[in-house]
Image: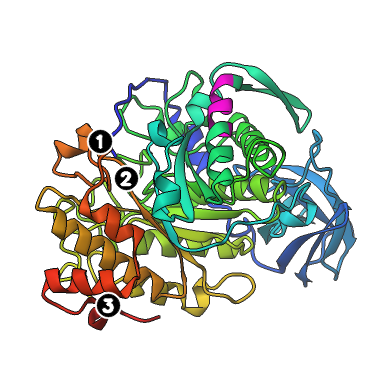
Amino acid sequence: MKKRCSFFILPALAVFFVLLLAPSMKADAAAGASLTSALIQGNQVVVTGTSSVSSEDGILHLYAQAPYESGTQGVEVAQAPNGTATFSFPLNKNTANSNLFKKFTIVAIQNGVPTAVSNSVYITNPEACASHTAARRDGGIKGILPAAQLLNANNLTDLGVQQATYNLLLGRITSGGGIDYQYNGKTWHFNAQVVSEYDIVAKRLNAQGIQVTFIVLNDLGADPTLIHPLARDGVAANYYALNAADQAGAEKLAAVASFLGQRYSNTGHGTVDNWIIGNEVNARQMWNYMQSSDVNQYAAEYAKAFRIMYNGLRSENANARVYVATDQQWSRASNAAQYYGSRPFLVAFNDYIRAEGNIDWRLSSHPYNVPLYDPNNWTPTGYATHSQSSPYVTMQNIDVITDFLSQPELLSPSGAVRTVKLSEVGYSSLNGEQQQAIAVTYAYLQAISNRYVDGLIISREMDEAVEIVQGMAVGLLNGSAQSKMAYDFYKHAGDPNYVAQASAMAGVDLTSIVTMR
C-alpha cells in the first residue's frame, strides 16, 4: 500500500539524540543488584529482586524513570534497607505521578555519589489495573482489509470473514479537537470528526460479528511530537518511528494509547480486540522511518514506544492483544540501506523487551510472495525455504516464523508460543483469476494448518488503481466491486470441493504440500 506524504524539517540536536538513545538495559555501575519483576498488586506496584549492594547511607533507593532516562535520572519512589530488594509504592494510575509507564532502577550511595547499581524493569502486568475487560471475538482466522466505501455492503458477511483490519492514522486523530481527554494530569485533544469515523468502522464490523484489528500508523500530522527526533530530518516517508525518546513524545503516546484502549473497549464506540503497532517496521526507510545504522539501537527505540502502547492499551482493556509488525524479508534485508531482516530485528527487539520485563507481545507478519506481483505461492523456490536462513517468509514457509517463536528465549511470560497474525497478504489477478484463486486457497490451507496462526488477512477487499499500476490487483473484487474467481474460492476456503478445484488448476494436490505445525 503506497501512501503519498509530505515532509518537514526540524533542527537536529545530535548530542541530545545520542543521550536519548543511550541503552538503559544495564546499570551504569558494576552489578550488585538485580531486579526481576515489577507487578501491579491492587493499587500498588511491587518491585522485587536480589541485592548484595551496600549503600553508604544504609538504604537502597528505587528510582522511577521515563523510557528516555538512565543512570540516576528520575524520581525516587521507594526505599529498602541494605541486603533487601523488595519495594512497594503507589501505582497512581491516571495522575501526574503515574508509575504505569515508568521503569525502575536501584540507586545506592557509593563514594558519596548516587549510583545506579541494578538493571531496569518495567511493569509487566498492566492488565491488572484495567478499567475494562471487553469480551474478545475469537471466532476464526479468515480475515480481510475491507474497502471503506463498501462497509455498508454485504460482502464481508457473504464471504464469512471473522476478522478485519483497518488503518488508524495518529496524525489524523491528534490534529484538531472536539474531544478533550484528561490523562495523567493533562488535557489532551482528539479530532472528534475523525474519531467518529473509526467509531463507525468498529461498530459496523462488530455488528457483523467480525473481530477488529486496528493498525496504528504514525503518519505526519500537524504536530510532530509523536515523530521520533531521529525522523525529523526532512526525509519523506510513508510512516515514521514513534517517539518515546523525550518527555513530550512519551507523555503524548501514553495518552493516545490510553484513549484508544478505553474508547474501543465496549464503551459504546465498538470494540477493537487487537492492535498492530506500525507497518512493516523493519523497513526503516519507507514504513517506519528513523535514522539508524544499527539494528539494536533501532529495535530499542521501537521497543520503548511499543511498551508505552502496550501498557496504555492493556491498562484499559485487559483482553487487548498488541502486535509487532514485520514484512516478508526474514534472515536478511534485500537492501541493507533501507531494511533490516525481520529475524534480526525481532531478535534485537525481544532481547530488549526480556531484559526489562517480558510482556505478551504478538507478531504481525506480511508473508507476501517474491516478487510481489507473482501469485504463485505453491511452487517451491529458493526464496522461501524451511530454514531459519530463508531469505523470505511467504505462505509457503510460515513454519519458519512459528518455529522461530517456539524457541525458549522467544516464549511469552506464561511460557506459550506467541501467536502470529498474517495481517497482510494478497495475490494479483493480473496473471489470471485462476492463479489468484489457487493462491488464496493454498494460503488458507497453510494458515489453518498452523496452530500458532491467529489470523489470515487478505490485503484488499477491492482493487486499488495505484496498486494495479504496480502489478498488484490483489482485491477479491475488481475496481467496479465485481467479484473475481478468488472471491468465491475465499468464501468457500477449506471446502473440499473448492480445494479439489484449486488443486486441479494448480496441477498438484494442495493438501499434500501443506506444512503442519
Which residue is under mark 2?
Answer: 460
| Disc sitting over residue 387 in the figure | 3
Quadrant for the N terminus in the image: top left
Residue 402: x and y, percent? 41, 73
Mark 1 or mark 3: whose residue is earlier in sequence: 3
Mark 3 or mark 2: whose residue is earlier in sequence: 3
- Mark toward the viewer: 3 or 2: 2
Tag 3: amino acid: Ser
Callouts 1 and 3 close, C-beta under 8 Å: no
Which residue is under mark 1?
Answer: 464
Tag 2: amino acid: Arg
Q: Is 344 rendered above or below residue 98?
A: below
Seen at 62% across and 34% down, the residue is 256
First to last magenta residue range: 193-199
- Label 3 sits on a secondary structure element that is loop
- Residue 226 lies in the magenta stretch: no
